[in-house]
Image: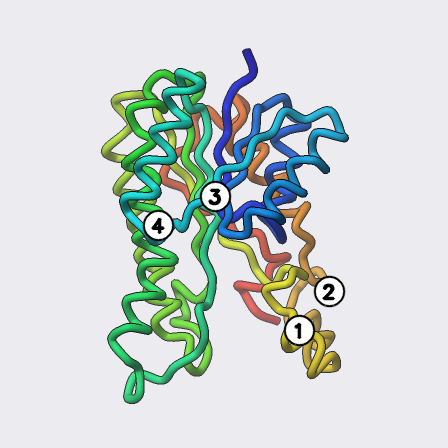
Amino acid sequence: MNKVAIITGATGGIGFEVAKRLGKDGYTVILNGIEDEKGMQRVEELTAEGITAEYFGFDVTKEDAVTASITQIGEKYGRIDVLVNNAGGLGGRSRFENMTTEFYRFVMALNLDSVFFASRAAIPFLKKGENPTIINYTSNAAWNAGGPGAGIYGTSKAGVHTLTRALAKDLAEYGIRVNAVSPGTIDTPFHKQIKSTKPEVFASWANNIMLGRLGKPEDVAGVISFLVSKDASFLTAETIQVGGGQALGI
């Protein structure tokens, strides 16, 4: 039986490339999202490439839905080998003076609560997995607090950084490794608005990256493929920058 990998927020962007890569690595991949039609389409695309895939639609900010769905997956397959907490996002921009409590709670739920809910639900099944691993996503904003209006996004991602290390400490006795990736500027639909309205600004971002180009979803997927493999069996509580040197500035 194939090993089982759950990837949240996997119907597009980096998440879908991670699902595709892990599927090619031999995993049965479980894609999560909130657009059911798109999710089923993605499963068809993966199946056409010989990958065993399934879609589960649930909102990662909803505790009961996350717990029920991941428990259902774990019970169906008898194990979970990899959980990739890919879902997350900026959620919009707001300066603190005008920030509503609802916006604050939404961004924290999307980026931090979601990781807690999914990880907690997966732990009993990860204990039954082979080389069990959790992968989280943090961001440069966790260190530099984000740009104007993105302060709460940076705060939520700083929380993910610490939660990753805390989970690694908590789960080491079970052989469950927990690491994070910190993508730099990756060319995905995440940047759709600025790419379409200010293409010159979007293109200029490469000037601040040491390797001189924007990242591709495949760049992140390759690092995650390594982190969940046996080659990384002595890595835990680490955050890998996947940004072409962007974090150092030039």
Instruction: Classify residue 96 as left or right of residue 77.
Output: left
Residue at 40%, 19% in the rendered image: 79
Instruction: Classify residue 71 as left or right of residue 101.
Output: right
Question: Compared with residue 147, is residue 20 higher up or lower down, i.e. above or below?
Answer: above
Residue 161 on image: x %, y %: 35, 52
Residue 205 is tagged as 1
Residue at 62%, 49% in the rendered image: 38
> Residue at the front extreme?
37
Mark 1 vs mark 2, CA separation in Å: 9 Å
Q: Which numbered disc flags the more N-terminal residue, 4 or 3?
A: 3
Residue type at mark 2: give it. Answer: Gly
Residue type at mark 1: give it. Answer: Trp
**Residue indicated by mark 4:** 114
Residue at 38%, 35% in the rendered image: 69
Question: Compared with residue 96, is residue 9 higher up or lower down, i.e. above or below?
Answer: above
**Residue indicated by mark 2:** 212
Residue type at mark 4: give it. Answer: Ser
**Residue indicated by mark 3:** 57
- In depth, the one of 238 and 104 nearer the eye is 104
Q: Is residue 50 visible?
A: yes
Mark 4 vs mark 1, CA separation in Å: 29 Å
- In depth, the one of 42 and 153 nearer the eye is 42
